[in-house]
Amino acid sequence: MSLLNRLKKNLKKHGKWSRKSNLDCWRLYDRDIPEYPYIIDLYGEYAVVWLRLEKIDYEEKRQGYIEELYSALDTLGFPENKRFIKQRKIQKVDEKYLKEAEENYTLVVKEGELSFEVNLSDYLDTGLFLDHRPWRQSFLERNFHEKRALNLFCYTGSLSVALAKANAQVTSVDLSPKYLQWAKRNFALNHLDERRHHWHEGDCLAYLRDLPTNSFDLIVIDPPSFSTSKKFRGSFDVQRDHPFLLKEALRIIKDNGEIYFSTNLRSFKIDPSFSQFIETSHKTIPSDFHDKKIHHSYFFHSKASE
């Protein structure tokens, strides 16, 4: 099957579903065909394309594949001025926090009843992780009235928005003041009063360590795979450091509380000592994602004390 035919098939298959679900942003193509290892996400009338940046992609034959990709997008109504090209490569730092451009091409997209600001031009990621759509939708189906929720590594706060819309009082923690401001704009877009919630700029591990026991009813932890920063010593490695995160989360969770943990590290293995965390990856990967290993997710529910 040619790339164009696959894109047409996916557009027909998911297009009707996305319109019915009021989704402006969804994954059109997810490395479906091995010869075309690209990712294409749609944001309204725009396409965001991720190319794999490896030596093989510079071979003459591979360049032809990229030209075929652009031609197919032209045919589908995403010409050069309607698409944004990103390049992913194996990296030692989490590049989603590194700026690539200064175009500031932002727009507001709908995800069901939620609205989010995305930046299509300036970063490796857009500000909205599409693979966490099932989490956001599941939170919206709940009522967390009088529940305290903690969102660690909150990024632009999309999960915090969903929790707040479900009536939780949310504490959002991130190292970046820029992303906390972005999160607050997302709160405003969803008619949420940021003053009724809590915000903390700083190292998530240090913040977690200082919390008193039994602090929250619900905890969401979606850390980067690896990161370094001038704001804290050393580095963060999710494989190495997740036992600390989960141990502290168990300490601060209230009776009958819930912990949600996710990581995009493909090789991730949860520490055997946390067998009480149930893997839920098969439930939390969206239907429009061909890659069923895009993340690993886990869930823990604390029992009420005897």
Image (tube, rainbow, N blue to C red):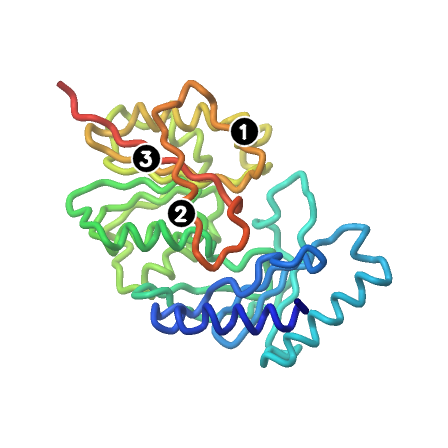
- The residue located at (52%, 28%) in the rendering is 269
Residue type at numbered disc 3: Ile
- To which quarter of the image does residue 281 belong? top left
In the rendering, at what x and y percent does residue 28 appear? Answer: 53, 65
Residue type at numbered disc 1: Gln
Residue type at numbered disc 2: Thr
Depth check, front residue: 291 or 132: 291
Residue at the spot of label 3: 259
* Residue 284 disc label: 2
- Crowding around mark 2 (Cα neighbors within 10 Å: few <14, some 14 to 19, many 20+) is many
Which of the two labelled residues, at mark 3 and mark 1, occupies the earlier sequence position? 1
Depth check, front residue: 118 or 87: 87
Residue at the spot of label 1: 239
Query: Answer yes or no: do the residues labelled 2 and 1 have beta carbons within 8 Å?
Result: no
Q: Relative to residue 73, is residue 293 drawn left or right?
A: left
- To which quarter of the image does residue 219 belong? top left
In the rendering, at what x and y percent does residue 83 appear? Answer: 61, 72
Q: Is residue 275 above or below residue 135?
A: above
Q: CA distance from mark 2 to mark 3?
A: 14 Å
Q: CA distance from mark 2 to mark 1?
A: 20 Å
Which residue is farthest front? 1
